[in-house]
Image (tube, rainbow, N blue to C red):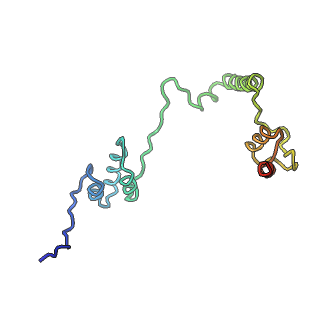
Amino acid sequence: MAREGDRQPKSVTPSISGTIEEVLAYVDGDLTRAQEAYDLESGKSKPRATLINSLIQAGAKPTVTPVTPDEGEVTPAESTADSPSEGSAAVAADKEAEQLLEEKLGAVPIAIENGTCETCEQPIDDQEIGLLSRTRFGKWQCTKCYIAQVSNK
């Protein structure tokens, strides 16, 4: 005689397209089924992250879809290797655009003048901090001197 608190275990019907428990029962340690279930679940518009993680733990491997260029799109290997004249034209266009930015918009060039901090004369260890200090305080600074100056304000 069963007591009131005793319950029978809920039976789960294996199914590749059912609940998480049903899919895991379907897989039951089989790598081929784990991959099959993973591919099916990951192809959905809203895959269940818990199921995906469980399937990966069961041995499924994420599928990598190769990216192919659209028609007319040029890949990096094609653009510079096949046509050196176009590559040099692109470099010239980049320099022209940089010069235009500097002249017309007042952009600060990213290259650091002498590569040393104007406060402690140590090498500038971070170009972005150097540029930030140049813009904010009018001088090139290493990270340490920039932080010290910001902290003193």
* Vertical placement of residue 135 versus 4, above or below: above
Residue 119 lies, in percent from the top left, at 87, 47
- Please report the residue visible at 40 percent of the width from the left and 55 percent of the height from the top: 53
Which quadrant of the rendered structure holds the N terminus? bottom left
**Does residue 144 appear left or right of residue 88 in this picture?**
right
Residue 133 lies, in percent from the top left, at 78, 42
Q: Nearer the viewer, residue 90 or 115?
A: 115
Residue 102 lies, in percent from the top left, at 76, 26
The residue positioned farthest toward the left in the image shown: 1
The residue positioned farthest toward the bottom in the image shown: 1
Q: Nearer the viewer, residue 55 or 88?
A: 55
**Does residue 5 appear left or right of residue 135 in this picture?**
left
- The part of the image, by quadrant, that contains residue 6 is bottom left
- The part of the image, by quadrant, that contains residue 46 is top left
> So how many labels did they put on this image?
0
- Please report the residue visible at 27 percent of the width from the left and 59 percent of the height from the top: 25
Residue 76 lies, in percent from the top left, at 59, 32
**Does residue 28 appear left or right of residue 62 in this picture?**
left
* Vertical placement of residue 109 versus 64, above or below: above
- Please report the residue visible at 76 percent of the width from the left and 24 percent of the height from the top: 99
**Does residue 65 appear left or right of residue 43 in this picture?**
right
* Vertical placement of residue 46 versus 57, above or below: above
The residue positioned farthest toward the front in the image shown: 153
